[in-house]
Image (cartoon, rainbow, N blue to C red):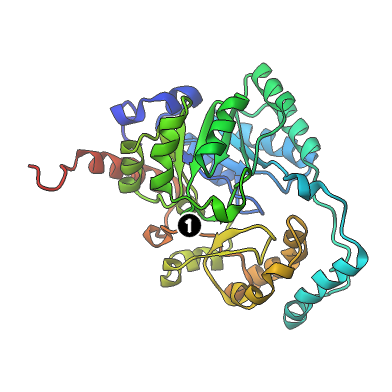
């Protein structure tokens, strides 16, 4: 990488997290993260991140150990804070039958067994996950979907672990700061994957990145990380100009060779279909931004009847897995932000270097009408 001592890279986020450049790789859940990607970004001077929300407590401990062996640089592990309604009792048999019935035609079309549809395996519990993660002591823990209870943040501080929250509105950013987290990701509605809104309904929290960032930067005193629709140096320069201390890039890194995305997912990200995205609950029960395909279009008529998260996510996993293995893009959750069309095939380290060079070029470029 080129010299990391440049002025735009020296700032509060880089100092807080011991980074050479204030570029955070977005954490991906559902098996899309990889140790290779996380370590490549961290070794390059940014903050590599790993989405751990589907891992068991034992799996989380093993992951941190593997990441510590792969890089001596800071990295982050991300967890989802559960919504209160998601902790409610499991649905009764009648509702499970209705949820399963909606998915059965797609399962049968792919020749998948349907006998487990009405009794999916339970998802890992957040309390057990966070206790395991705190015990493993990664350099940084990031959260999305909400704010963990005070005892979690107190223990993180005691262990010297930095914490980062994710906000989709100014109110959420203020709440994250008030809880005592070290930094906040201002995640605009341009971002791919799941919407992390937790104070208002998601349809009242769809603020675009470049509207959200300056408002959050003005409202809070902790470092602000801009996320959503940023995939090149021009986007980074714009975010910094609007008051961000750094950026988080998801889709751009998801499209790199080291990510855990399937070959068909990466191929679609690099193709013309990536110019269009849609917000859908079809795959997980939570609203998420993806490239539309047959499944999202056909499921649209049933979205109000689908199972809630995390049940829908668990129910659709066999469908998504089989489709990815068979190269069937019509049934894969093609998570993508709105800047995916700016991506191209390359390795993560090369991409990180290009982001640095592109940022410097954009910051040097004179404003229109000036020499």
User: In what quadrant of the picture does the C terminus appear?
Assistant: top left
Q: Nearer the viewer, residue 168 or 331?
A: 168
- Bin the neighbour count of mark 1 within 10 Å (Cα to Cα): few under 14, some 14-19, many 20 and up: many
Does residue 42 appear left or right of residue 310 in this picture?
left
Give how far across and how far down residue 191 sits, in percent. Answer: 49, 53
From this viewpoint, which residue is outermost toward the top? Answer: 158
Give how far across and how far down residue 109 sits, in percent. Answer: 73, 82
Give how far across and how far down residue 188 sits, in percent. Answer: 47, 48
Does residue 176 appear left or right of residue 188 in this picture?
right
Q: Is residue 209 above or below residue 15?
A: below
| Viewer can see residue 363 | yes
| Viewer can see residue 44 | no
From this viewpoint, which residue is outermost toward the right? Answer: 93
For numbered disc 1, what is the local secondary structure?
Answer: loop
Q: Name the residue that disc number 1 marks.
A: 337
Q: Nearer the viewer, residue 300 or 70?
A: 300
């Amino acid at each position: 990488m080129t010299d990391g001592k440049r002025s735009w890279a020296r700032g509060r986020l880089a100092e807080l997290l011991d980074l050479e450049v204030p570029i955070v790789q977005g954490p991906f859940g559902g098996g899309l993260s990889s140790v290779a990607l996380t370590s490549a970004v961290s070794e390059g001077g940014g903050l590599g991140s790993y989405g751990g929300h589907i891992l068991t407590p034992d799996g989380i401990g093993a992951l941190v150990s593997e990441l510590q062996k792969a890089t001596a640089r800071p990295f982050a592990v991300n967890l989802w804070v559960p919504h209160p309604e998601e902790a409610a009792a499991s649905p009764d048999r009648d509702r499970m039958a209705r949820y399963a019935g909606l998915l059965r035609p797609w399962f049968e079309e792919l020749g998948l067994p349907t006998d487990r549809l009405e009794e999916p395996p339970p998802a890992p519990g957040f309390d057990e996950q966070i206790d395991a993660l705190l015990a493993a002591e990664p350099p940084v823990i990031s959260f999305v979907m909400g704010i963990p209870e005070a005892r979690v943040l107190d223990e993180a501080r005691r262990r010297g672990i930095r914490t980062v929250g994710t906000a989709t509105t100014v109110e959420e950013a203020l709440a994250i700061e008030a809880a005592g987290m070290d930094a906040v990701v201002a995640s605009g509605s341009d971002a791919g994957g799941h919407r992390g809104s937790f104070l208002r309904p998601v349809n009242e929290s769809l603020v675009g990145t470049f509207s959200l960032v300056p408002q959050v930067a003005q409202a809070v005193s902790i470092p602000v990380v801009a996320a959503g629709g940023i995939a090149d140096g021009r986007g980074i320069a714009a975010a910094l100009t609007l008051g961000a201390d750094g950026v988080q890039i998801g889709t751009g890194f998801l499209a790199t060779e080291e990510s855990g995305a399937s070959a068909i997912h990466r191929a679609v990200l690099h193709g013309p279909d990536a110019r269009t995205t849609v917000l859908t609950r079809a795959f997980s029960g939570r609203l998420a931004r993806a490239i539309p395909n047959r499944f999202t279009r056909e499921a649209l008529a049933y979205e109000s009847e689908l199972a809630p998260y995390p049940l829908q996510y668990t129910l659709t996993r066999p469908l998504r897995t089989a489709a990815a293995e068979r190269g069937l893009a019509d049934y894969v959750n093609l998570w993508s932000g709105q800047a995916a069309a700016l991506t191209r095939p390359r390795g993560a380290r090369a991409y990180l270097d290009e982001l640095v060079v592109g940022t410097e070029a954009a910051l040097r470029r004179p404003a229109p009408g000036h020499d």
